[in-house]
Each structure stands twice: as C-alpha cells, then as structure tokens.
Amino acid sequence: QVQFVESGGGLVQPGGSLRLSCEVSGIAFKIYEMGWYRQSPGKQRELVALLTTDRRTKYADPVKGRFSVSRDNNKNAVYLDMIMLKPEDTAVYLCHVDLYGRGSEDFRYWGQGTQVTVSL
C-alpha cells in the first residue's frame, strides 16, 4: 500500500519562504518521477515541479526562479523549496509520484495535500 507523509505547509507572508516535504512508503524500488502539483478553489490542478531519477526537471512558468525541487532517492522523498512566495501561490500542494514515468494512471499516486497560504 502506497502511503504519503507530507509536511511543511502553513501560513506565510508575501516574500517569505517555505519547504514542503513528502516521503513515500510502500514502494520497494526507486520511483522514477516525483514532484508537486497544486490546486486552488475554482482552478484546475496544475503541475508545479517534478524531478526524475535521471535528473530531468520541469517547472511551471509562474514558479521558475523561485521554487526548487529536490529528492532523496534512498528515502523515496521529494522536497519543494519555495522562496519569494506570492499570494497567487496560495493552494493545496499535492505530492505526486509516477512510478515508471509512463503517465499511466495505474502507476500514479497522490498525497493528501498540504495547505500553503500566502497572506499578510
């Protein structure tokens, strides 16, 4: 059974920083693709950042230069360092894994999400 432990969300002022963490258990091998999506009310879920085992990265345009994704393959953990946060970054951030990177829903899993709120 695949399980996620996400942490690091919270309330931060504009311009502040946060670090999200996600550790995945129940997978006995190195997960190919790990990353983060986000969803805010009334909007579609969108990719934030991802990182593969062969070190390929992808970032959404709004977060480029401000967010950085990293991972610990020994722990099947993924992290998201966020700086210069803006109110429009407010969303539920969901940890996401794609075991083989093929896009098949059979091998994609989602965490429960952690709330990030950027406000004065």
Image: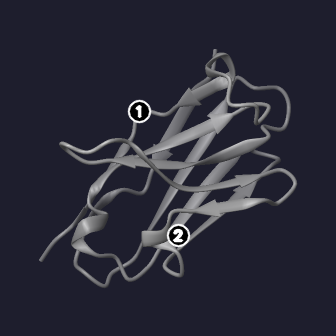
**Residue drawn where x is 16% and y is 71% of the image:** 119
**Residue drawn where x is 48% and y is 34% of the image:** 111
Q: Quadrant of the C terminus?
A: bottom left
**Residue 76 can be seen in this image:** no
Number of labelled discs? 2
Residue type at mark 1?
A: Gln
Query: How much space separates mark 1 and mark 2, taking CA atoms?
Result: 19 Å
Q: Position of residue 17 (x, y in %)?
A: 39, 77
Label 2, residues with CA under 10 Å away: few <14, some 14-19, many ≥20? some
Q: Residue at label 1?
A: 112
- Residue 74 is labelled as none
Label 1, residues with CA under 10 Å away: few <14, some 14-19, many ≥20? few
Secondary structure state at the residue bearing disc 1: loop
- Asked if residue 91 is positioned above or below residue 87 in the image, the reply reads above
- Residue 81 is labelled as 2
Residue in front for this viewpoint, 108 or 31: 108
Which circle's residue, 1 or 2, is located before the other in the chain?
A: 2
Which color scheme does this rendered protein use? Answer: one colour
